[in-house]
Image (tube, rainbow, N blue to C red):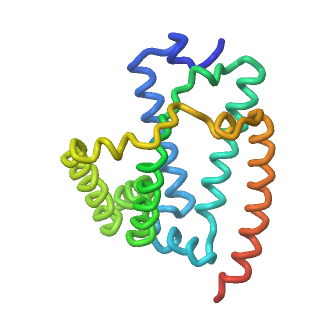
């Protein structure tokens, strides 16, 4: 059996939604268990006191990347059939900056604010209200900013395709960067944890 399961017809629309729900609930559960429903823990990463967020997210990214790479290599997954979100350079750069500012000011990203609000955290609820309001405002102003929203179109492209190197090289380099990042994060936490 090869994947993606949905594209090959192994699962239907309803099953794919159930899988998405189960994965989302599990992800939220593990975020909460790791303490990432706390704005204090999340904001501590910006002061290098607690880099749990960095380590957890980088671990998730590297695990997914290795899984896709090796499953594709063995023929169990056809990665060329996986949907890639199109890259629009300028709106995504601005969106990343807005996201970062919101993360620093609010203490949460959208996912962790949902986790915090599910545990009854008032600041989590306010962050969810804030990003839902932002989505509503974006939907209303979209006709006026559509030109900018579609600027810098690179299409559906991977980083390996962008820099024109084999995927295996990118995977190898990112694994090394992750290992160095984990090593450096331990040093920074020891240095700043009590500062």
Q: Is residue 185 above or below residue 58?
A: below
Q: From the viewer's perspective, tell me whether residue 181 is left or right of residue 80.
A: right
- Which quarter of the figure has residue 47? bottom right
Where's residue 56, x and y in %? Answer: 63, 56
- Which quarter of the figure has residue 117? bottom left
Q: Is residue 4 above or below residue 150?
A: above
Where's residue 142, x and y in %? Answer: 24, 44
Q: Residue at x 80, y 39 (%)?
A: 169
Q: Is residue 138 above or below residue 191?
A: above
Number of numbered labels in the structure image:
0
The residue lying furthest to the bottom in this view is 195
- Which quarter of the figure has residue 101? bottom left
Image quarter in which the N terminus is found: top right
Q: Residue at x 70, y 18 (%)?
A: 76
Q: Residue at x 30, y 68 (%)?
A: 122
Residue nearest the viewer, comparing 146 with 46: 146
Residue nearest the viewer, comparing 191 with 173: 173
Q: From the viewer's perspective, tell me whether residue 24 is left or right of residue 159.
A: left
Where's residue 12, x and y in %? Answer: 44, 15
Q: From the viewer's perspective, tell me whether residue 71 is left or right of residue 11.
A: right
Image quarter in which the C terminus is found: bottom right
Q: From the viewer's perspective, tell me whether residue 103 is left or right of residue 65.
A: left
Q: Residue at x 49, y 39 (%)?
A: 87
Residue nearest the viewer, comparing 62 with 164: 164
């Amino acid at each position: 059996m090869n994947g993606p399961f949905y594209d090959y017809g192994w699962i239907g629309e309803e099953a794919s939604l159930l899988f998405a729900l189960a994965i989302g609930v599990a992800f939220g559960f593990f975020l909460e268990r790791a303490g990432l429903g706390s704005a204090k823990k999340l904001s501590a990463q910006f002061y290098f006191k607690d880099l749990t967020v960095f380590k957890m997210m980088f671990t998730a990214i590297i695990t997914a990347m290795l899984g896709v790479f090796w499953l594709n290599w063995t023929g169990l997954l056809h990665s060329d059939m996986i949907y890639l979100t199109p890259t629009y350079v300028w709106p995504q750069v601005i969106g990343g900056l807005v996201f970062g500012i919101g993360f620093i000011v609010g203490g949460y990203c959208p996912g962790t604010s949902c986790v915090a609000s599910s545990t009854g955290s008032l600041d989590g609820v306010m962050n969810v209200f804030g990003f839902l309001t932002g989505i509503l405002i974006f939907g209303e102003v979209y006709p006026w900013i559509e030109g900018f929203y579609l600027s810098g179109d690179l299409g559906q492209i991977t980083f390996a395709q962008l820099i024109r190197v084999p995927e295996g090289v990118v995977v190898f380099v990112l694994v090394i960067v992750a290992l160095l990042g984990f090593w450096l994060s331990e040093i920074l936490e020891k240095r700043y944890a009590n500062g």
